[in-house]
Amino acid sequence: MIELEVSLGERSYLIHIGSGGIADAKLWRRHIRGRQVLVLSNATVAPLYLDTLLDGLHGLAHASVILEDGEQFKTFDNIARILDTLARLGANRDATLIALGGGVIGDMGGFAAACWMRGIAFVQMPTTLLAMVDSSVGGKTGVNLAAGKNLVGAFHQPSAVVIDTATLATLPRREFVSGLAEVIKIGAIGDAAFFGFLENHAEAILGREPGVLEQAIAVSCRHKAGVVARDEREQGERALLNFGHTFAHALETETGYGHLLHGEAVAIGMLLAARLSASLGRAAQADAERLQALLERMGLPTRLPNGMDPQRLLQHMRLDKKSVSGELRLILWRGIGQAEIVSGIDETAILDQLKNTAAAA
């Protein structure tokens, strides 16, 4: 079992990476506070892993909430359902919430944990590749509104992250490929050598070879853990982790939650950011082409879905959380491994890039 630490002083926590973590109650029970536990999962994951997890809760008062599976269910109605179950459990301030599922379950579980009695412990048990390498680490939680993704949320760090890589064996191919976008992002924003590793091992990763895959997950988590430790509240460096995300969130909002998977939207968004960087003379076009080649080798989309209105996408981007004083702030790059925060970009250049990509689609 690989162990990494997210160093945040008294709020530091471990990331456990390896096969069989869910069944290893000795591994994760030490991270549970008190004697009351709520398990949050979804209708896809629960039939596969919930019973195993509940076996490990022997002797503790516990309850479960099983939600429908999908981004469109990341709503306040479901947050209310989670909180009502905590109330019926009689959960006090030393209760623990376990989030067993993908990024939606992790985000909602963390937000509910942050709200209940102004904050209880929660353990992330991500079962999708995207959640393993991204959303489970760093304490970002959130709920969607019709106006935009994750517009309501809180920073609330988990007490542990248990990444059971065996769960990837049951992950549908589309979900697995979607998660690879966040893996590629790590190389794109700050680790050119890792980007090269992904190029050299693309087929092994797609084949889910355990050794190569665990290495890719560990590198991704180690990078994010370091960034979070240096900039927990996203006042500077952590914003780089949003490479491609302003475009991506606009796409998700416009297409309707659930039509594009998050990683698919991020893949398109990263390429848009790379092409915009090239058009502004900030990076070489060859690097954008190299990124496109890797995304396509991994089976990720690189074009806007049919029917996208560039003007509407730009409107969604203006509402993005990364905007400052009403001005768009984008994560662009100087080339592979060299992301940067850029403000004051002429919206005409952004719109032109969206139009060009829409035309290419």
Image (tube, rainbow, N blue to C red):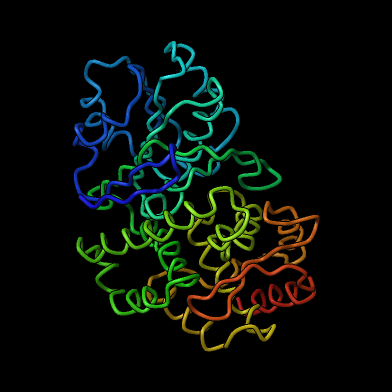
Residue at the spot 68% in from the left edge and 79% down from the top edge:
356
Instruction: Judge left or right: residue 46 versus residue 316.
Output: left
Q: How many marks?
A: 0
As drawn, 125 above or below 113: below
As drawn, 342 above or below 285: above
Q: 86 or 208, which is in the foreground?
A: 86
Q: Position of residue 177 (x, y in %)?
A: 38, 62
Q: Position of residue 284 (x, y in %)?
A: 57, 88
Instruction: Judge left or right: residue 261 versus residue 277.
Output: left
Residue at the spot 39% in from the left edge and 25% down from the top edge:
96
Looking at the rendering, which quadrant does residue 237 occupy? bottom right
> Residue furthest toward the front?
9
Is the C terminus in the top left, top right, bottom left or bottom right quadrant? bottom right
Q: 268 or 109, which is in the foreground?
A: 109
Instruction: Judge left or right: residue 312 versus residue 133.
Output: right
Instruction: Judge left or right: residue 122 versus residue 350.
Output: left
Q: 1 or 301, which is in the foreground?
A: 1
Looking at the rendering, which quadrant does residue 126 occupy? top left
